[in-house]
Amino acid sequence: MSIARICSRAACHRPAVSTLTYVYADSTCVLGPLATYAEPHCYDLCADHADRLTAPNGWEVIRLAPDPAASGPSDDDLEALANAVRDAARPLPSPSRESVPGAPVEIARRGHLRMLQDPGSTAADTTEQA
């Protein structure tokens, strides 16, 4: 199974580099960079078919050129990734009973699952139940 999207034109098996969208209300064809996701009413085109694209009579073609600087990760992306890793590495603050009276207290954690203690029970009650 191929992950890369191919050209939508019949009998063309080259990789897609552009996405074509028709705006019928404005009689316009918009040809831009390859969309992130394949949409049902958009057409992915290879470089050859994108270059040779012509519109029906009376229609306008808008060609959106990709921004070369946007193709790679920016400094903002790298900084956001570093901040996310830093935040994930920080230990969670220990819950205190005084912060929210009557709220359940987390006593154990495994992955994304948490074991909560009923605010009315004590630690001795929890060990007796196990």
Image (cartoon, rainbow, N blue to C red):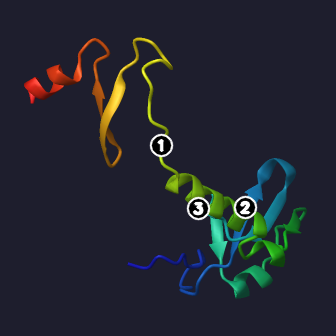
The percent coordinates of residue 105 (x first, y second) are: 36, 25
The percent coordinates of residue 36 (x first, y second) are: 63, 64
Q: Is residue 117 left or right of residue 16?
A: left
The residue shown at (79%, 84%) is 51
Instruction: Give the class, few, some or many, for how many residues have Cα within 10 Å of label 2's Cα (few <14, many ≥20).
Output: some
Q: Is residue 93 left or right of residue 113?
A: right
The disc labelled 2 sits on which kind of residue? Thr
Say which of 13 and 32 sits in front. 32
Q: Secondary structure at mark 1?
A: loop
- Image-quadrant location for residue 63: bottom right
Q: Are marks 3 and 1 in contact (CB under 8 Å)?
A: no
User: Upstream in the sequence, badge 1 or badge 2?
Assistant: 2
The numbered disc on residue 92 is 1
Q: The N terminus appears in which quarter of the rendering? A: bottom left
User: Upstream in the sequence, badge 3 or badge 1?
Assistant: 3
Label 1 and label 2: CA atoms lie apart by 47 Å
Residue 130: tell me if it is visible.
yes
The disc labelled 1 sits on which kind of residue? Leu
Residue 40: tell me if it is visible.
no
Residue under circle 2? 21
Mark nearer the viewer, 3 or 2:
3
The residue shown at (84%, 69%) is 64
- Image-quadrant location for residue 33: bottom right
Q: Secondary structure at mark 2?
A: strand
Instruction: Give the class, few, some or many, for how many residues have Cα within 10 Å of label 1's Cα (few <14, many ≥20).
Output: few
Depicted 121 relative to depicted 38: above or below: above
